[in-house]
Image (cartoon, grey):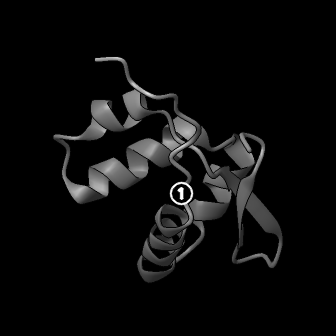
Amino acid sequence: MALERFHFTGADGNDYSLPKMVKGGDLRKIRKLSNADQMFTLFEMLADEKTLSALDELTTAEVSDVYNDWMQGMSSGESSNSTV
């Protein structure tokens, strides 16, 4: 479902979320970036300002954990059969 969200707890103890689905085009745009650039580019593309601020307050290890957990729960979305 497109409205599903990935949730994480910020350093302030509040709940924040990111979309569970990322468009293929967004992934294509970042494919040649370094791992850190991929992570922060996706955050900046998909998170609202409050969520970005919450991510900024986390330690490097915590940001990495949020990203890895987010990617593990990522949905590829719905697709139809190809006729090609």
* Spot occupied by residue 70 in the image (x, y as percentages of width and height): 54, 64
Tell me: residue 16, above or below residue 25.
below
Q: Position of residue 59 (x, y in %)?
A: 49, 78
Image quadrant holding the C terminus, namely: top left
Image position, residue 13 (x, y; %): 81, 79
Label 1 SS: loop
Above or below 49: residue 61: below
User: Which residue type does callout 1 highlight?
Assistant: Met
Residue 40 percent coordinates (x, y): 41, 50
Farthest-out residue, right: 14
Within the image, what quadrant is residue 7 found in?
bottom right
Q: Is residue 12 left or right of residue 33?
A: right
Quadrant placement of the N terminus: top right
Residue under label 1: 74
Left or right: where does residue 83 sit relative to residue 34?
right
Picture residue at 43% right of the left edge, 73% below the top: 64
Q: Residues within 10 Å of mark 1 (few under 14, many from 20)?
A: some
Q: Residue at x 29, y 38 (%)?
A: 30
Residue at the spot x=73%, y=54% of the render?
Answer: 5
Q: Residue at x 29, y 32 (%)?
A: 28
Number of numbered discs on residues: 1
In the rendered view, would you say 66 is above or below 39?
Answer: below
**As rendered, which of 52 and 72 lies closer to the eye?**
72
Q: Is residue 50 left or right of residue 45?
A: right
Quadrant for residue 25, please give it. Answer: top left
Horizontally, residue 51 falls left or right of residue 57, namely right
